[in-house]
Image (cartoon, coloured by chain):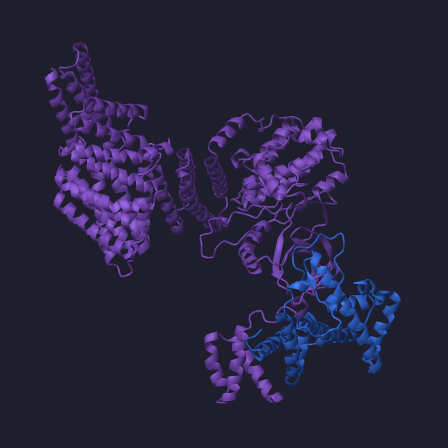
Amino acid sequence: MAERAKIPEKNPLMDPSHQQPVTQLLAQWRDGDERAFAQLSGIMYEELRQLAQRHLRRERSNHTMQKTALVNEAFVRLVGQQSVDWQSRQHFVGLASKLMRRVLVDYARARLANKRGGGAGVLSLDEMAEPAEPDEAPSTTPTALQHLDAHTQEEVSAIDQALQRLEQIDARQAQIVEMRYFGGLTVEQTAEAIGISEATVKREWTLARAWLRRELGKSF
Amino acid sequence: MTPERWGRVKEIFSTALEREPTQRAPYLEVACEGDEELRAEVKSLLEAHDTAGAFIEEDAAQRIGLAGAQSRKDWIGRRLGPYRIVGEAGRGGMSEVFRAVRDDQQYEKQVAIKLLKPGLDTDSLLRRFKAERQILAQLSHPHIAHLLDGGATEEGAPYLVMEFIEGKPIDVYCDERQLGVDERLDLFRALCSAVHYVHQHLMVHGDLKCGNVLVTGQGVVKLLDFGIAKLLSPTPASGQAEPRNTSFLALTPEYASPEQVRGEPISTASDIYSLGVLLYRLLSGALPYEATGSTTWALAKQICEHDPKPPSVTAVEATTGYSRFATTLRGDLDNIVLKALKKLPEERYPSAEQLAEDLRRYLRGFPVAARPDTTGYRVRKFAQRHRSAAVAAGLFVAALIAGIITTTWQAHRARVQTLRAERHLNEVRELTSVYLADVYDAVAYLPGGTRARKLLVENSIKYLAALEQEAHDLPQLQRDLAVAYDRLGDVQGDYIGANIGDTQGALESHRKALRLRRTLVQHDPTLQARRELLRSCVKLSEMLMGQSAVAEALPLAREGAQMADTLVQDKAATALERRYAAAAYMNYGWARGLTGEVEPGMELMEKARQLHERLAAENPTDADAQRNLVVVIGRMGDVYAEGVDQPAKALPFYEQALRLMQPIAAANPDDAELQRGTAFILSSIADLQNDLNRPREGLANYERALAIIKPLQEADPDDQLAPQATAFMLNGRGESHLLLGEYAAALHDLSEAEKILRAGPAPQPTDMAELRMLPGITYANLARVGAMMAQQTSMPKHMRANYVRESRDWSQRALAILQPLTTDALEGRHAKQVIAGMNAATAPLH
């Protein structure tokens, strides 16, 4: 518990002084700078993880109606209103989806490991989750964490693995699934990020979905 | 798998999905050109697709509860259909509102997009939107912001597109500019004209409130969200006539009318109420009922049960500078606002236009229509006494008033013709299926229920008459009208049953139904049309027989039986047709039997019995089928008992009917109709037993009948038939006593019967002859008892002299009633018999 209080509420990356690096890193990565890519990945992964963590807490008292993709939220936070070229944005969204996939799969695995009694010391999102604010009414409804059952975690994990196989057959389809399922992007956003038509996204998505459905059998 | 092969899979899979499911297998056969492996691959993918349901449609983050809450800003720039969101505009309880522009237009016309809460049933909402958009598109009024379009976001949240209005809610506008009373009334009257326009187009707004009435910088009033309440109201079951479609969600409880709060059907009158709330707010600074600190339920209760304070009183209490209005409000404006806020819809202004007109009169210094509440006390008293009945009747009146006003408007509005027809269909169906059936039945056995029924009937007649003039070219409407008249006829005076005893009215309604149905059959002789025509023939002829109008009844009964012949032979005939046919045979057989044609009559009735027996055997649990069998057997008894006066032959039929009836009645103790039926059979048996000079048995059966009928009479004091039935049975029991030589007991029963008959309404010429005869028979029996008493030698002389006088008096009364009836086609012979019996008994006195 004492550990948790130390997690900074405000992401240092939100500080305007830190925003420059992200757009810069994006540009460098676009120009083929591998180091920039590694650095960017680190920053973004951390950002996404923290966003996810915050949303886990917010879930309890969430009165807002519309849901948004964390990927988009991360973009707003890391790049903000600064102008980036469309290519950088495409890169960002693609990378963010990939990273989001990792955040989610890591999270699901950690949860599963905990449930099975193993995984001592594995850092997971809910371990970091802070207790409810004191002014919040004691929640009688189960939190999102309690909703989370092993089934969902296994599903996330199984889709991740099946997706690795799909990448061998049809990389673009796998990317579409990654963006939509893990990145939480809409058809329109996915089309924009990859640079193809919405109709194509829909068509590819339909087949990929059927393929995954078949691969996962009847267990999900 | 090679990329080429995967490409083939992709192509065939996508093409197959575009085909109808049944066409897919043949398509695969052709497309795979004998490549079995390929075919199996695509086939398994198609199967997986079909069973995928919502698989991975929800993204992983949402699945595990990590979805981000979207800020409103994130919507800006997003595209919804042809619209692009460019800014925020406001928010409500169920929605967020954005400013948007059309992407595909050369000029940028701004619209407002209302994004609704996910979880509303998007599909049905959009379906209803499609159904309504034609109507919505027709509307054009300077004070209405129009609904333009609708759709769903990718996440499945429905949205609606409206004309964008730059303005402030009317209450904010008034307060910011510190407008005076007159200026506020001017704005409000503009609003009334918009609402009236909506009503003229046969719609209600359903969610009138300050937040939905904007005033632009130029001071122009704009009504928003018109049509939305209806779109958001719960979906009726598909395929139904949607009789309850008019009930809206109470979207904003503070502004909702009592009927809306109760979730009952609402009408234009409900909008008038909400206008009243809005005006209350503009004039007093507060709402008549505030939700603060209380639950929605408490608010609802207040709305339904408490009278609001006059606005002038609230204005004084308000801290926000409204107290300066108090003096102005006192009197006329208080009355006007309170009239709009009446609990009973029919007590409010009949239209928004009339509300506006009353305000105009106030502004010009003329007397207004709204008066201080003088009838309130009486109405409340009535409502307290007959709570349920009053509620039902009130609702009904509201619905009808809307309907009648609608009807008048329509005369000038040819262009809304189809709309009108559809709307009327729904209204008539609602009348028939909700009010004349459900509501009517619901209030039937409540104390005071008969009075509520009467109100229903009176309003129905007005309404249907107005509607009938428009129905001539609309078969569907004619059909529904016939059903409504049929039902109304039942309500007005069924042959047997709790009713309001308006026989003449009932005949008139059944005649109207018959006329409409004749036309329909001529036009298109479907099975249904013929069945319904048969039904009208039977009903009307049965009622006419009850009136002894044999000349009119017999041809109708014959027509019914002839139709029955062709109906049962129709290949498409179902149990329903057979039941109707049986009813027609029974009816015609009964009519012939009663008019002396016993043989052919009994033959027809035997046909009916066989049909009913089969139907009852097919549906052993169907109480109606069993009941019908009882009825036909009872009627066979009637033929012998009344038609040819052979009580010994009649008795076995009645006894059989009783044996069949008792278990049904016992199984349905709450069905008053069945209990009543049992009592009538028992009393018929007792009648015969008296006739057969077995008065001991007769006495016992009258006792049993009375034990059933008395509680029924107490349960509904307004039911006309119950006291008559009681009197009938008391008279019979008196006769049993008379035959047994128990004169004191006979005198008691007969006097009791006479008292009941005297207290009730005088028999009308249109009443059943049997009922008209009853007082005569009772007096005749009294005369006989008096004669017997007068001959008691053990009695003191002056008392015997008294009985002689009384007996003479009674026999004169009896004659006065019975003599005219001796010419009655059905009861004439019976009347003569009674007179003869009486004369024989009183002869020794002369």
Residue B453 picture location, percent across and down: 40, 36
Residue B826 picture location, percent across and down: 18, 35
Q: Residue at x 55, y 25 (%)?
A: B374
Image-quadrant location for residue A180? bottom right
Tell me if residue B820 comes above or below residue B88 in the rendering. Answer: above
Image-quadrant location for residue A216? bottom right
Q: Which residue is drawn at 21% across and 19% down?
A: B810
Instruction: Work out whether residue B806 or residue B484 is closer to the camera in this orientation and state it.
Output: B806
Examine the rendering and report whether any part of residue B811 can be seen: yes
Residue B49 picture location, percent across and down: 55, 75
Examine the rendering and report whether any part of residue B109 can be seen: no
Indicate the colour of chain B: purple
Instruction: Work out whether residue B105 or residue B298 is closer to the camera in this orientation and state it.
Output: B298
Residue B343 picture location, percent across and down: 55, 35
Quarter of the image where the C terminus of chain A is located: bottom right
Tell me if residue A184 comes above or below residue B220 in the rendering. Answer: below
Colour-to-chain, blue = A
Relative placement, left or right, of B201 versus B784 is right
Q: Which residue is drawn at 28% across and 58% down?
A: B573
Relative placement, left or right, of B589 versus B39 is left
Tell me if residue B54 comes above or below residue B14 in the rendering. Answer: above
Q: Residue at x 73, y 63 (%)?
A: A55
Instruction: Work out whether residue A35 or residue B280 is closer to the camera in this orientation and state it.
Output: A35
Relative placement, left or right, of B279 versus B405 is right
Name the outermost residue toward the top: B798
Relative placement, left or right, of B603 versus B157 is left
